[in-house]
Amino acid sequence: MEIMDGKVTSFGTFFLPGPTEVRQEVLAAMLKPMIPHRSVEFEELFASLQQGLREVFLTRRPVYIAAASGTGMMEAAIRALPAGPILSLVNGAFSERFAHIAEMCGREVDRYEVPWGEVHPLDRVEDSLSKKRYRAVTATHSETSTGALSDVRAISDLAHSHDTLCMIDSVSGLAGAELRFDDWKLDYVLTGSQKSFALPSGLAFGVASDELVELARKAEHRGVYFDIVEMDRYAKQNQTPATPAFSLMYALEVQLGFIRREGIENRWARHSEMLKATSSWLDESSRRLGIEWENIVRPESRSPTVSTIRLPSSIPGREFVKKVKAHGIQVATGYGKLGDTTFRIGHMGDHDVSTLQNCFAACEQAIRD
Ligand code: PMP
């Protein structure tokens, strides 16, 4: 238990699928003073962040650090693409957002939609790619609105076999679900700070292949703030194009130290264990409580970072979340159209199977109430 501003806080009460709970040591790092951003001191900080971030993305490429949320780096993905139609794989709210951003940036977009909770069958993705020549596919690794995990490596390989780029949103995946940028020969991956990285919200990260950056030079209307060509140029000099979010970077530096000590593969394994514990708990508590509740995603496509759980029809989702809160635990309502019938547990970041027990106990108590 820790005391902050006279209030007792304890880690293990906040289970949103982003933002997730942030360690006190990471929050405390943000109290450090500002430094000049065009300075050796900043370049040293940036270089050390690069080293840590590369160990998370598993890449030798520069990792762009934007003072933005994940949506900003989604827009950067679209703006980097030279002319040509885009195929958006849509299976929830955030994959739909990717398609929407592309449209709002003036692109021709075809959506291949499957029902929320499902992933796209790869043979059908192949069919879509065969029917038309696309410049790029957009894909969402961990669809946070449902908890479905897509095989982005296979999707990227399929795209490449059609000479198409693949732009991957891994906002709730990266640092919790396996992703290997270099080995999987990916083109572009973006994420945000507030999910499996377990940092405060406000930073977004992106990595682009060398080939994508070269192609992006030919893209028109790349804008300024989300132009990966500029981000790439500055990152190679350990700089950011605009004033960086120093305080968040100090937090990142400390958290990257924790991530390095854990090891990225161990971090993925811990997230898989949390998913397994959540699925087992749902089975066991169904019997104990005499109710039916289950993850809406089939076992083979579940994200290790977030579970969306269908409630018995007699229990409204938003009421349930309030009742859980009354027991000191924050879980999330279902997203959008799933709000009335489901709730979500974010088992991501620095949570583990033991902190999850608090969450399970409060959910069971809410049902008993
Ligand atoms: N994509 C996914 C998969 C997300 O979960 C989110 C945030 N919930 C976003 C994109 C958008 O990120 P942000 O809210 O950080 O802009």
Image (spheres, rainbow, N blue to C red):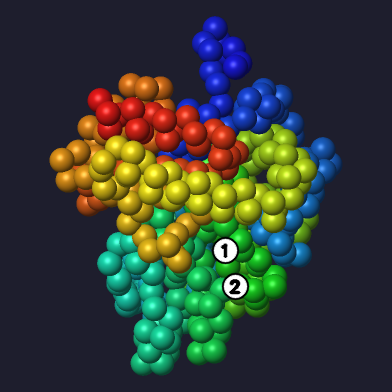
Q: Position of residue 277 (x, y in %)?
A: 50, 46
Residue 165 visible in the displayed image: no
Camera-side residue of 76 and 331:
331
Q: Quadrant of the N terminus?
A: top right
293 or 72, which lies in front? 293
Furthest-bottom residue in view?
Answer: 131
Horizontal relation, residue 267 to residue 327: left or right: right
- Tell me the quarter of the picture where residue 316 sits: top left
Q: The residue tagged with tag 1: helix, strand or loop? A: strand
Q: Are marks 2 and 1 in contact (CB under 8 Å)?
A: no
- Residue 76 at what x, y percent from top left? 51, 61
Task: Using the image as rendered, state which of residue 207 and residue 258 is in the foreground.
Answer: 258
- CB of residue at label 1: within 8 Å of ligand 1? no
Identified at 43% across, 44% down, the residue is: 281
Residue 254 position, x and y percent, is: 72, 36
- Looking at the rendered structure, the kind of residue marked 2 is Asp
- Amino acid type indicated by mark 1: Val
Is 155 drawn above or below residue 230 in the view shown? below
Where residue 189 is drawn, which disc sits there?
1
Q: Mark 1: few, some, or many residues within 10 Å (few <14, many ≥20)?
A: many
Please name the residue that numbered disc 2 is placed on. Answer: 187
Which residue is located at x 69 percent, y 39 percent?
Answer: 255
Q: Residue at x 64, y 41 (%)?
A: 244
| Figure check: 290 above or below 97 | above
Q: Residue at x 32, y 44 (%)?
A: 286
Question: Marks 2 and 1, how far apart in space?
Answer: 7 Å
Q: Is residue 170 visible?
A: yes
